[in-house]
Image (cartoon, rainbow, N blue to C red):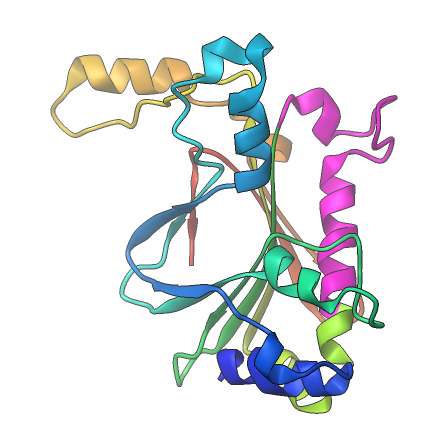
C-alpha cells in the first residue's frame, strides 16, 4: 500500500510525473540495522577520523520479530520533489510501515551519530540540539505526506504512530560488543562498551505534534522493539 501511495498518489498531489519518481524500499524482519549513509561516508572520508575507519556504521538497531516492515529511504525519495511544494529541505531519513492486519504501524525515523553535547541544546550549529532538530524534520516530513487525502487517511488511521529518533554516541567504540550467553569475557566487554544508562539518553517516549504520534528515542546499541 505505501509503495503505491508514494509511487502514484503523492506525485499526482504535487504535480509530478509518477513515472519519474522512484521509491527505494526494502522489506525487513527479525533484527536489522539502519545507518545514515551520508554522514557515515563523510566520517570515513575524514582523514582526522582514522579511529573510525573500522566502524560498523550502525546507528539504529531494530527487532521486528516476525513482522514484515517496509523501510523507505525517505530523504532520498522526497529529494525528487525539488521545486514543488513538497520540497522540504529538513526531512527525516526513513519512513517505516507495517501493514499487519490487526496492528498497522507507521514510523518516521531520523538518525544521528553525535557527541551527547550536540544532541542536547548547545552553542553549536543546532542550538536546540539534534534531538529537537530531528523532531522538527520528522514533523515536517509528515505534513508533506498528509497533504494527499488517501495518504493522510492511511497514516492517521494506523494503530501505532511513532516518530523514532535513533542516535549513536560518536565517542563509543567503532564496533560495540554485544553480550552473549555463557561468554563471561564477551559480556564484560559489552558492559564496558555500553552507553550510559541515563534514562534521558537511552529511551524516552512522549506524545508530539497534533496527530497523536509518540516520540521515541533509542540510543545504540539498545534495540528498538518494533
Q: Is residue 77 above or below residue 190?
A: below
Residue 160 sits in quarter: bottom right
The percent position of residue 123, horizontal first and vertical second, equals: 88, 21
> How many numbered marks are there?
0
**For the view shown, which residue lies furthest in the left direction?**
182
Q: Residue at x 75, y 29 (%)?
A: 120
Q: Residue at x 39, y 64 (%)?
A: 26
**Is 168 placed left or right of 127 in the picture?**
left
**Is 199 placed left or right of 147 in the picture?**
left
Query: Magenta region: which residues?
Result: 114-142
Depth check: give the residue in front, 91 or 68. 91
The percent position of residue 196, horizontal first and vertical second, equals: 53, 22
Q: Is residue 45 visible?
A: yes
Q: State yes or no: residue 117 in magenta.
A: yes
Q: Residue at x 29, y 28 (%)?
A: 178
Q: Residue at x 78, y 43 (%)?
A: 132
Q: State yes or no: residue 23 in magenta.
A: no
Depth check: give the residue in front, 106 or 113. 113
**Is 200 placed left or right of 147 in the picture?**
left
The percent position of residue 42, horizontal first and vertical second, equals: 59, 28
Depth check: give the residue in front, 14 or 165. 14
Q: Is residue 71 above or below residue 166?
A: below
The percent position of residue 63, horizontal first and vertical second, equals: 35, 52
Q: Look at the image and tell me in which quarter the C terminus lies.
A: bottom left
Residue 99 sits in quarter: bottom left
**For the view shown, which residue lies furthest in the bottom direction?**
150
Q: Is residue 151 visible?
A: no
Amino acid at each position: 500500500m505505501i509503495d503505491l501511495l508514494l509511487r502514484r498518489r503523492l506525485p499526482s498531489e504535487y504535480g509530478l510525473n509518477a513515472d519519474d519518481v522512484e521509491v527505494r524500499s526494502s522489506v525487513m524482519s527479525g533484527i536489522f540495522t539502519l545507518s545514515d549513509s551520508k554522514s557515515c561516508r563523510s566520517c570515513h572520508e575524514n582523514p582526522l577520523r582514522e579511529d573510525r575507519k573500522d566502524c560498523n556504521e550502525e546507528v539504529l538497531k531494530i527487532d521486528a520479530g516476525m513482522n514484515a516492515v517496509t523501510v523507505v529511504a525517505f530523504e532520498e525519495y522526497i529529494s525528487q520533489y525539488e521545486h514543488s511544494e513538497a520540497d522540504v529541505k529538513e526531512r527525516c531519513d526513513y519512513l517505516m510501515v507495517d501493514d499487519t492486519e490487526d496492528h498497522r504501524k507507521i514510523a518516521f525515523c531520523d538518525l544521528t551519530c553525535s557527541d551527547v553535547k550536540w544532541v542536547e541544546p548547545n552553542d553549536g550549529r543546532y542550538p536546540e540540539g539534534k534531538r529537537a532538530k530531528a523532531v522538527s524534520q520528522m514533523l515536517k516530513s509528515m505534513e508533506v505526506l498528509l497533504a494527499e487525502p488517501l495518504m493522510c487517511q492511511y497514516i492517521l488511521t494506523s494503530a501505532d504512530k511513532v516518530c523514532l529518533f535513533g542516535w549513536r554516541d560518536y565517542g563509543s567504540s567503532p564496533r560495540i560488543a554485544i553480550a552473549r550467553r555463557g561468554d563471561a569475557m564477551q559480556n564484560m566487554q559489552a558492559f564496558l562498551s555500553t552507553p550510559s544508562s541515563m534514562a534521558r539518553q537511552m529511551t524516552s517516549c512522549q506524545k508530539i505534534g497534533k496527530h497523536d504520534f509518540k516520540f521515541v528515542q533509542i540510543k545504540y546499541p539498545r534495540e528498538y522493539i518494533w
